[in-house]
Image (spheres, helix red, strand yellow):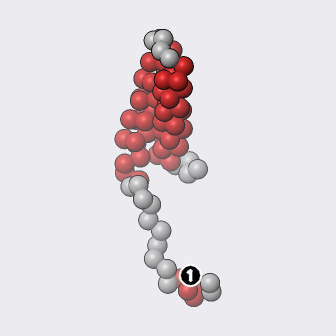
């Protein structure tokens, strides 16, 4: 692809609005903390604990990335 072709491409626009990042960060991190509390206090079957722990880990990771992007640390 040549430079002229690249210049004619449309500007990048993110799939998720930048204005939505603080809300996404707050909801994801609060849900991760709630699920972590749920895993550590109630005894359940190991398979169920693994599923809840994986969901909490995903939410914590996504919430952290959203929080970083909110404050201007684009990762």
- Total of numbered circles in the picture? 1
Nearer to us in this view, 37 or 24: 37
Residue 66, compared with residue 40, is above or below; it is below
Residue at image position (49%, 80%) is: 9
What percent of the width, then of the height, locates residue 5?
A: 55, 86
Residue at image position (44%, 18%) is: 38
Nearer to us in this view, 23 or 53: 53
Nearer to us in this view, 48 or 20: 48
Residue 31, compared with residue 15, is above or below; it is above
Q: Is 69 placed left or right of 1 in the picture?
A: left
Residue 33, compared with residue 2, is above or below; it is above
Residue at image position (47%, 15%) is: 44
What percent of the width, then of the height, locates residue 57?
A: 54, 32
What percent of the width, then of the height, locates residue 24?
A: 40, 42
Answer yes or no: is residue 64 visible.
no
Residue at image position (37%, 48%) is: 20
Q: Residues within 10 Å of mark 1 (few under 14, many from 20)?
A: few
Q: Which residue is mark 1?
A: 6
What percent of the width, then of the height, locates residue 71?
A: 49, 44
Dot 1: element: helix
Task: Quarter of the image for the N terminus: give it.
Answer: bottom right
Q: Quadrant of residue 6?
A: bottom right
Answer yes or no: is residue 46 visible.
yes
């Amino acid at each position: 692809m040549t430079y002229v072709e690249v210049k004619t491409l449309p500007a990048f626009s993110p799939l998720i609005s930048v204005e939505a990042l603080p809300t996404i960060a707050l909801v994801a991190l609060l849900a991760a903390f709630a699920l972590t509390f749920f895993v550590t206090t109630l005894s359940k079957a190991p398979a169920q604990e693994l599923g809840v722990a994986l969901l909490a880990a995903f939410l914590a990771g996504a919430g952290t990335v959203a929080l970083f992007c909110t404050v201007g640390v684009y990762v």
